[in-house]
Image: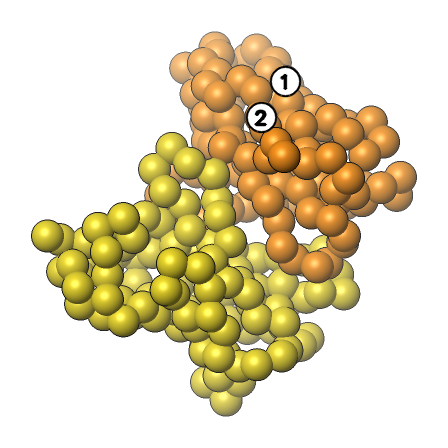
Chain colours: A orange, B yellow
Amino acid sequence: GAGVSQSPSNKVTEKGKDVELRCDPISGHTALYWYRQRLGQGLEFLIYFQGNSAPDKSGLPSDRFSAERTGESVSTLTIQRTQQEDSAVYLCASSLEQGKGEQYFGPGTRLTVT
Amino acid sequence: AQSVTQLDSHVSVSEGTPVLLRCNYSSSYSPSLFWYVQHPNKGLQLLLKYTSAATLVKGINGFEAEFKKSETSFHLTKPSAHMSDAAEYFCVVSDTNRNDMRFGAGTRLTVKP
């Protein structure tokens, strides 16, 4: 019974470069969420996938951010032309159904933009 | 729109003494409320949740929380702190009919020997 996994665990990149973060949800979980957690702050919702429905992108901070999910499996979060303000921990979570609330979180990817 | 306010950014207690982490929420709908814990370098873990059943909710590791609609509060308590309780705690409000889950800014709990 593996939990949610994320890779890489740490990523250091230069300003202006693109990065891709990966999330493997728990098998059978139809809902998948991405959050951003800046140092000392709470979680900021980014994007949500539910099955084959159109994703809820309302939390993406700019058009440099995008995410994809293939069916009910892996998701990737892409940040283009990274800025120093993008430095944060990016957390992925999955749950069995939309709105049931109990989300299972991965360990996160710590992104540092230099 | 929903929001949640954690009233203390940092709480420090001595081992064996009670813990109180305060949370107030605002919601236009009948909310679901959660507490998550985040240990250093670990993922977020669900402590407990309220979803319109009993107003006193018991969670893991001896924690419990009481939903008080009149006070719009969902404070987290534990009778006796343990060193292993030192972590960051997040209060979360969600509308179960929508994908709208809002996290508080977190409360860092320190437990002194």
Chain to which mark 2 belongs: A
In front here: B16 or A13?
B16
Residue in view at x 65 percent, y 57 percent: A101
Q: Is residue A59 left or right of residue A72?
A: left
Q: Is residue A85 above or below residue B71?
A: above
Vertical position of residue A16 compared to residue A24: above or below: above
For disc 2, the marked residue is: A6
Going 48% across and 79% down the picture, which residue do you hit?
B56
Task: Point out which mark residue A46 bears.
Answer: none
Q: Residue at x 61, y 32 (%)?
A: A2
Q: Within the image, what quadrant is residue B23 found in?
A: bottom left
Specify the subunit that label 1 lies on. Answer: A
Q: Residue B90's x, y, as percent?
A: 44, 55
Amino acid type at image mark 2: Gln
Q: Which residue is mark 1?
A: A20
Across and down, in percent, residue A18 comes to 61, 13
| In the image, farthest residue toward the bottom | B70
- The mark closer to the camera, 2 or 1, is 2
* B89 vs A22: above or below: below
